[in-house]
Image: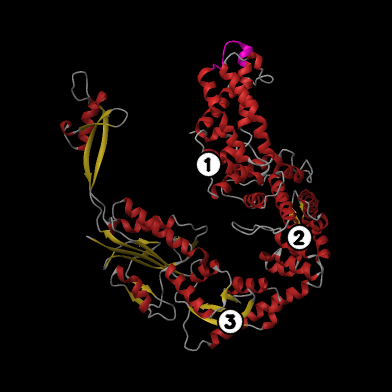
Amino acid sequence: MQDTLLVELLTEELPPKSLARLGAALAEALAEDLRQDGFLSEGSEIRHFATPRRLAVRVTAVLAKAPDTEVLIKGPSVKSGLDAKGAPSPALLGFAKKRGVAVAALERIDDGKQEVFAHRDFASGSRLETNLALKVEAALKKLPIPKVMRWGSGDAEFVRPVHGLVMMHGARVVPGTVLGLASGNRTLGHRFMGEGELVIGHASEYETLLEIRGAVIADFERRKTAIGAALARAAEGAALAESADLLSEVTALVEYPVVYEGRFSEDFLAVPQECLILSMKQHQKYFPLLDPETGKLLPRFLIVSNLKAADVGNIIRGNERVLRARLADAKFFYDHDRKTRLAERTPRLAQVVYHNRLGSLLERVTRIQKLAITIAGKLGADTTRAERAAWLCKADLVTDMVGEFPELQGIMGQYYALNDGEAPEVARAIEAHYHPRFAGDTLPADNIGAAVALADKLDTLVGIYGVGGAPTGDKDPFALRRHALGILRILAEKSLPLDLLQLLQAARALFPSETVAESVALDVHQFMLERLRNYLRDRDFQPDEIEAVVSQNPTRIDLVPLRLAAVQEFKKLPEAASLAVANKRIQNILRKTAAPEGEPDLALMQEEAERALFGATARLSPVVSSYIGSGDYTDALRALAQARKEVDTFFDEVMVMTEEPLIRNNRLALLKQLGDLMNQVADISRLAA
C-alpha cells in the first residue's frame, strides 16, 4: 500500500535567517533516507513547509512496506572452495551451512578479481512504522544547526524546543517517538487567528487545513510570494528599497502576513537616507519606499504584520512611534558627528588596535596613505587627492553613526567629508575604497578611488597573510579571499596597467621585516592566482585556456583577459592542436635534460628540417615580438601558426637526443628558442588533449 507521508515538528520560534534552509535540509535528508530503503515510488513528490513555529515534510506515494530486495552474499573463492579432486572444502561447506543451503545451490560468479561461490537470497523489505521515527531522528541530526539547546528535564536537543510531533501515513498515525515526543495527528495553527488545536484527517490535507482553519500559510515560498505581491500593491507606485534578504527574513517571522503602511516626519529626511533605510530594515524589519524617478526616500514605510486586525490604527501608530525613536537616534548621531571634522578624528585611530602584531588603525592608515600615493602616481592620478582620501578613509570608524551602524562605514565618511568641504573626488574615494564589498558589486569610478581601494586591500592581504592569517579550508575570518578578488577585479575590469607583484612588494615594504617577511609578497601572489582561476572560471573561460595563461604566473592582471581572448581565437585555428602537442613535447624533452648552453648555431645543423625550423623561428620572432609589444596577442598567436609545417617536419625527421653532444645541445637550444617564442602569450602546451 502507498499513500502520502507527513512529518511535522511543532516548535517554539525558529531562527528566521536559517528557517528556509532548515526546512529544505530536513526534506532532503528524510527523502533521501526513504529513497535508499525503497519506500519512495517513481512518482513520489517531496514538499517541505517552514513557518516560525514548525518544520514539516510531505511526500506522496510512500510505501507502507519497502519491497523485498535480492541479496548476493559472496563466499570462498572457487580455488579455495574445492580440493584437487573437486570436492567441497571445509570453508565451502561451512559457508553453505551458514546460508542454510546445499553446496549445489550456490552460484559461481566473477567478482572482478576472481571466481567465487555466492548465494543469492531475498531480504524482506522493512516496514515504515518500525523505521520512520529513526529516519526522522537521523534527518534532524543532519540539519545545519550550529548550536542546539535542551528544554525540560529530558535529553532531547534541537535548535529550539519542540512541543509537538505529527507522523502520518495517509489517515493513519505512524507510531514512534522523536525528541522524546510520541507521534500523533494534531497540530496548532496561528497563535491568535487559528481555531486552536487542529486534527489532521489525512496527510494530504495538511496544507489546506492549516490555511483555512489555522490561518497559516505553511509553504515558505508561497508565503514569500504573497508578501512580495502585497508589498507591491501597498507601495502604490512607489519603489521598494532593495530588500531581498529582508523579504526572506520577514517571511520567516510571520505565518499569516498582512501589510500595513506607516509614515514618519519629513524632518528626518535631512539625515542621509542610507542611515534611515538601514535603521528601518535592520532594527524594525520595515520596508522603506523610494521615489521611483529620483530614488529618494519617501516618508512612508511598509510593515509586514503577523496579525489581521479589525482596527489597524493601533498597530500602525505603535510601529510609527517605535520608528520615530529610532530615526531620532539616527538624526542625533548625524548632527553630533558633524560637529567634529573627519581630519580631527583620524589621530584618534591611534587608540584603536587593528591587529596586535600590525599596530593601530592609525598605523594602518599611514601605510595605506603611502601606498595610495605610489599607485595614484603610476596611474597618473592626482596624488595629493589620493593622499588626502587615504588619510580620511577610516576616520568615520570613530563616529557615533558608524558605531551604531558599522555597515555605513565609508558611506558616512563620504557625507562627512562633503560636509567638511573636502574635494568631491576625495569624498567619493572615501566611500569607494571599500568597493567591491561583495560579488557583483560596483568598482571605484575613478583612479583616485581605485588607488585608495587597492592600497587598503593590499595592506590587509599582505599584513594579515604575513602574520599567519591565511585562509584555511572554509575559514577566512579576515575575508582575504574577498580582498584578493576585489584587487583582481579592479585591475582587470578597469584595465589598470599595474604590476601586481610590484604592488605586493611595495605593500610588504611598509611593514617591518621581522613582522612580515619579504617572501610574503610571492606567497600572496600565488594565493591571488588561485583566486584568479576561480574568477576566470566564473567568466566562462575554459580550464585549459585559464591554465595556458595563469600557469605563467602573470603579474599584469589587466592583460590576462586579452591573452585569454587570444588563446580562444588560437584554439579555433586548424594548426592549434598540432602546435599544442609539439609544445608539450618540447617541454617534456627540456624538462628531462640539462638546460642547453648558448643559442642554436646554424653551422651545427645537419638536417634540412632543423635548418628550416631555425629559419622559421628567426623569421617569426620579430613579427611575434612586434605584435606582443603592441598588445595584439591574437595576431601574435596567429603568426605562430605559420610554423606548423616546419615544427611537424622537425619532429618527424630529426632525432633530438643524438649521441653527438654538440649536435644534441644545439638541437635542444633550438627547441628552447622555439618554446620561448611559442609561449610568450600563453603556455599553449596546456591546450594539448
Q: Which mark is residue 319?
A: 3
Q: How crowded is mark 1: few (under 14 residues within 10 Å), some or many (20 or more)?
A: some
Q: Residue 391 carries which label?
A: none
Whole-percent x and y of residue 582? Answer: 53, 27
Q: Is residue 108 above or below residue 360?
A: above
Picture residue at 49% right of the left edge, 35% below the top: 574
Q: How crowded is mark 2: few (under 14 residues within 10 Å), some or many (20 or more)?
A: many
Q: CB under 8 Å between callouts 2 and 1?
A: no
Q: Which of marks 2 and 1 is nearer the N terminus?
A: 2
Picture residue at 57% right of the left edge, 22% below the top: 589
User: Quick check: is 397 in the magenta stretch?
Assistant: no
Question: Residue 183, can we see it?
Answer: yes
* 70 sits left or right of 303 in the view: left
> Callout 3: helix, strand or loop?
helix
> How far is disc 2 from disc 1 in space, using C-alphas?
39 Å
> Callout 2: helix, strand or loop?
loop
Magenta residues, as a range?
A: 654-664
Question: Residue 682, can we see it?
Answer: no
Q: Which mark is residue 543?
A: 1
Applied colour scheme: secondary structure
User: Quick check: is 662 in the magenta stretch?
Assistant: yes
Q: In this view, does 588 lie above or below 281?
A: above
Q: CB under 8 Å between callouts 1 and 3?
A: no
* 569 sits left or right of 43 in the view: right
Q: Residue 393 carries which label?
A: 2
Front residue of this view, candidates 361 and 639 = 639
Q: Earlier in the sequence, mark 2 or mark 3?
A: 3
- Residue flagged by tag 1: what amino acid is it? Pro
> Callout 1: helix, strand or loop?
helix
Front residue of this view, candidates 87 and 336 = 336
